[in-house]
Image (cartoon, grey):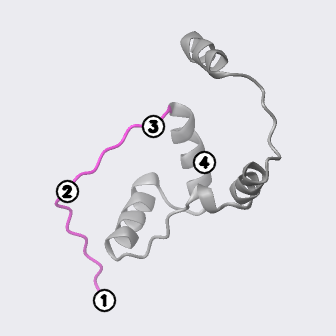
C-alpha cells in the first residue's frame, strides 16, 4: 500500500526557542519531528478526536473553588496592590 501525502497548506506558529528545543528533544525520543507531530495533532483535531484540558476542572481548581465558597481564603492585599504590581511589569 502506498502512503501518499498531498501537501496543499502550510501552517506556521511562533514559539520561544526554549519550547522549540525542548519539543524537538522530547519528540525525537518518540522518533518524530515537530512537523510530523503537528500533522498528527491537526488530523486528530480535524476528526474531532481532541479533548481539550479545562484547567477549571483540575483537582487544584476545584479545591480552591470550595475554599473560596466556604470563606477559607486569606486576604493578602487590595486592589491598589494589584495595580502597583501590574504597573511594575
Residue 9 in picture, x, y percent from top left = 19, 56
Q: What residue is shown at x 60% (from left), y 43% (from top)? A: 22
The residue to which callout 3 is attached is 15
In this view of the protein, which residue sits in the foreground, 31 or 27?
A: 27
The quadrant holding residue 19 is: top right
Looking at the image, tell me whether mark 1 or mark 3 is earlier in sequence order: 1
Please say if the residues under marks 2 and 4 sit with CB atoms less than 8 Å apart.
no
Residues at marks 1 and 4, CA–CA distance in whole angstroms? 31 Å
Residues at marks 1 and 3, CA–CA distance in whole angstroms? 37 Å
Indicate the secondary structure of the residue bearing disc 4: helix
Indicate the secondary structure of the residue bearing disc 2: loop
Looking at the image, tell me whether mark 3 or mark 2 is earlier in sequence order: 2
Q: Which segment did they paint magenta?
A: 1-16
Q: Which quarter of the image is occupied by the N terminus?
A: bottom left
Task: Give the crowd class for mark 3: few <14, some 14-19, many >=20 residues within 10 Å.
Answer: few
> Which disc number belongs to residue 16?
none
> Which disc number belongs to residue 1?
1
Looking at the image, tell me whether mark 2 or mark 4 is earlier in sequence order: 2
Please say if the residues under marks 1 and 3 sit with CB atoms less than 8 Å apart.
no
The residue to which callout 2 is attached is 9
Amino acid at each position: 500500500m502506498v502512503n501518499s501525502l498531498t501537501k496543499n497548506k502550510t501552517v506556521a506558529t511562533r514559539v520561544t526557542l526554549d519550547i522549540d528545543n525542548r519539543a524537538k528533544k522530547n519528540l525525537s525520543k518518540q522518533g518524530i519531528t515537530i512537523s510530523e507531530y503537528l500533522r498528527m495533532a491537526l488530523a486528530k483535531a480535524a476528526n474531532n478526536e481532541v479533548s481539550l484540558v479545562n484547567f477549571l476542572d483540575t483537582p487544584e481548581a476545584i479545591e480552591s473553588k470550595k475554599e473560596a465558597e466556604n470563606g477559607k481564603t486569606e486576604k493578602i492585599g487590595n486592589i491598589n496592590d494589584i495595580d502597583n504590581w501590574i504597573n511594575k511589569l
